[in-house]
Image: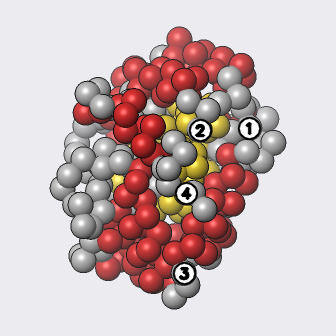
Amino acid sequence: MKIFETHAHFDDECYDEDREILIDEMIGENGIIESIVNVGASFKGCTDSVELAKKYDQIYAAIGLHPEDIESLDDEVIEWLTNQVKTNEKVVAIGEIGLDYHYDEPDRELQKEAFKRQLILASDLNKPIIIHSRDACKDTLDILRDTLDTSGEHVYKNGGIIHCYSYSKEAALDFLDLGFHIGVGGVVTFKNAKKLKEAVKVIPLDRLVLETDSPYMAPEPHRGSRNDSRNIQYVAEKIAELKEISAQEIIDITNQNAKKLFWRN
């Protein structure tokens, strides 16, 4: 069975030289990829993701502004995001949005406000969310728990994915309690990823999804090189090893998880 890739950035300029060839190899008749969610980060990344989804039947778009790009988040961008979700069935989620405290910029309070604004938007539009959270576990959980949409409902009601999960197994259970899926990528294959491996062991199979975060985070044995969705098989194999089941079972289950999340309507 082919694999559902829940998080990639094939709009990235590093693919400009061979994007069409690569995508055809991944999703073509002999490729191993069934579907790809191409995730926007900047506003340009969002528009490019929409164009990729328009061009390829097997590519879908998630749109939203990454915490490093929140300076672009104005009323005009919110209106564009809203219109895309309402009129384009290939837009399946709001993301990637969230908090990134690894560096001092942008200002953390500005990040929080942008995160809340996009969470409310996603909830009002009944779309799942793809969350980027780096060195910001407590604030991410607090905002998800405390923020209400314009109807007074919790913004986590439609679920979503904690992308490129990096926190403890205890925190994973907190995100699971809110209804989220956990996105696991190439980092799980790294020798020093002990915390992630422990988390994967306790996450129920029906709450895992596979991702690559291409072009970043290439798994072993390709660590350090440009990533693409064909490497997702290494992620499936490592999770299978940790869960003590077959890679095919991981693929079957995570494919269904992704489809239920993104195509529930």
Of the two numbered discs 4 and 1 in the rendering, the one whose residue sits closer to the viewer: 4
Q: Nearer the viewer, residue 202 or 210?
A: 210
Q: Residue at x 54, y 45 (%)?
A: 29
Choose top left, top right, bottom left or bottom right for residue 249.
bottom right
Residue 150 position, x and y percent, is 73, 32
Of the two numbered discs 3 and 1 in the rendering, the one whose residue sits closer to the viewer: 3
> Which residue in the protein does label 4 denote?
3
View extreme (front): residue: 30
> Which residue in the protein does label 3 denote?
246
**Cα–Cα span, label 2 and label 1:** 22 Å
Q: Is tag 2's residue or tag 1's residue first in the polypeptide sequence? A: 2
Q: Residue at x 31, y 44 (%)?
A: 215
Residue 16 position, x and y percent, is 29, 26
Q: Is residue 114 visible?
A: no
Q: Amino acid at mark 1?
A: Asn
Q: Amino acid at mark 2?
A: Gln
| 156, above or below 19, in the image | below
Residue 8 position, x and y percent, is 43, 44
> Which residue in the protein does label 2 denote?
58
Q: Is tag 4's residue or tag 1's residue first in the polypeptide sequence? A: 4
Q: Is tag 2's residue or tag 4's residue first in the polypeptide sequence? A: 4
